[in-house]
Structures are given as structure tokens and as C-alpha cells.
Amino acid sequence: MEKNERKRIELLDELRGFAIIAMIIHHTFLDITYVLGLPWGEKVFDGLSVLQPIFWAIFIIISGICSRLSRNTLKRGATVLGAGLIITLATAVIMPLFGFTGAEIYFGILHCLGACMIITGLLMPLIKKTKPIIGMIISAALFAVFYSVGSHSLLFGLIRLPDALYKTNYLMPLGFFNSTFYSADYFAILPWLFMFLFGSFLGKYAADGAFPKWTYKKRSRFFSFIGRNSLWVYLAHQPIIFGILFLIGIFIN
């Protein structure tokens, strides 16, 4: 199917929109504690954290799939990474000036996705030469191998990594950091790059128009709209929520 004839896979937009809304609701409970000083917000946030991996997986795999549908993955990656840097500026520089600390984001989901898009864009010639099913298997295996990097190990603790990798925070984008590092939202390139690559290999079927027919049908205009505009929704949600909670704080105090 030619690019100009390819149908939009509405399910991808809807799932991404659903994942974004779930992330926003989850983050709101943490903001309730930071802005309003209500400890129950963080308790609810911690309780819902068990569901986080589901939404992470949806969002990252779909982003990987879309890397095969994008006209310029490198350009898209630079845009998303730049958006992540704007969030760092807002949370680590601007917000502390107004007394809001503890919400600093140094390498969150947008930083990670932007980096993954750039890496995938550079690897695209190799990705296109690899059979999708083989690439998916290798990506899934490497994700499992590197999943415990943040715990100083590989293969879920079977292989211990050198302590020298964790002496500083300079390598924190890769997943290596010491006890002084903190980021309210943190997604390291390792292992999440491999989940993104899994989606990229899966995206070959999307590029060929080979997804099941029911995935091309729109079911929710709301989630579809959010999914199509996920970057801007994600960028806007924190300032809006902080503003609303700040106004609420003024009225209840």
C-alpha cells in the first residue's frame, strides 16, 4: 500500500490517548501532595504505580510502531527530545524559583522517546534489512537482559555490573546513576530502547497495511484526538494541573 493510500490505524491513536490520560491522572495525585500539601495524594499515586508498566508499554511500543510510519524519524526525535529539555527547564529551574521542589525531571519519558527515535532513525537501514519477527524476538530478549540496569545488574540480578558505572550521574541517560540522583519521571535509554525497537519491528506490518481490519476503525473521538496530539497534551498537562491546584490552594487556605 502506497504511503499516500495508507489508512490511519485509529487504534494506535486511541490506545496512545488512553495511555496519556492514565499518566496524567496518575501524575495529578502526586501534584496534589506537592502543591496542596495533602499526603493522601502521594499514597494514591504509590498505590496506582502498580499499573504504570501497562501504560508505559502501550506508549513506548506505539511510539516505536509509528517510527516506521514517520516521514522523518530523526527530525521527530529531535523535536520530542527538545520538548523533554523544556520540561527539565520548567521543573528543575523555573518551578524551584516559586518554591516548588521535588518535581524535577531530568530524563523523563519525552527525553527517552526522543533519544530512542534518534537512535532508531540512525539504525533504520539495518532495521529494514532485518525480518520483523527476528527483530522483535531479539528486542524482547535484550529488554529482559537490560531491565535491571538500574539495580546494578543484568538478567534480573544474575550478572552484577561494575560499581564504577554508578560512581557519577553523567551516565544517567543510559541507566547508570548513584544514590544522589533523583528525577520525578525517569526513563533510561536502557532498557526502554529495546521496547521501542520491538515496536519499530512490529511497525513493519503497520507500514505494509497488514494490521487487522478492526484496528483501522475509529471508536473514540476523544482518545483519538488526545493520541494524535499526545506531545502537546503531555507538555501542557503539568502547567495546567499545577495552575488549577495552585488556585485551589489559594481558596482553601
Image (cartoon, rainbow, N blue to C red):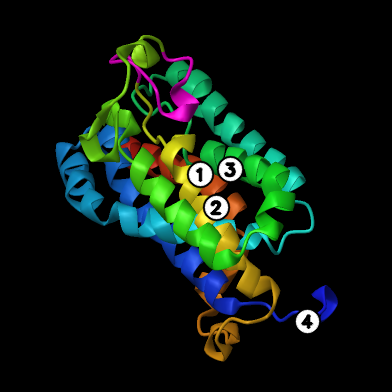
> Can residue 226 be seen here?
no
Q: Residue placed at 58% from the left, 81% from the top?
A: 211
Residue 59 is left or right of residue 122, and the answer is: left
Q: Earlier in the sequence, mark 2 or mark 4?
A: 4
Residue linked to disc 2? 197
Q: Earlier in the sequence, mark 4 or mark 1?
A: 4
**Circle 3 SS class:** helix
Residue linked to disc 3? 116
Circle 3/circle 1 CB separation < 8 Å: yes
Q: Are there few (<14), some (14-19), or many (20+) residues within 10 Å of tag 2? A: many
CA–CA distance in space, label 2 to label 4? 23 Å
CA–CA distance in space, label 2 to label 3? 8 Å
Q: Quadrant of the C terminus?
A: top left
Q: Are there few (<14), some (14-19), or many (20+) residues within 10 Å of tag 4? A: few
Find residue 64 and report its image quarter.
bottom right
Q: Residue placed at 23% from the left, 46% from the top?
A: 45
CA–CA distance in space, label 2 to label 1? 6 Å
Residue 187 locus on image (x, y percent): 43, 38
Residue 229 locus on image (x, y percent): 62, 60
From what the image shows, is residue 56 above or below residue 220?
above
Residue nearest the viewer, comparing 41 with 134 = 134
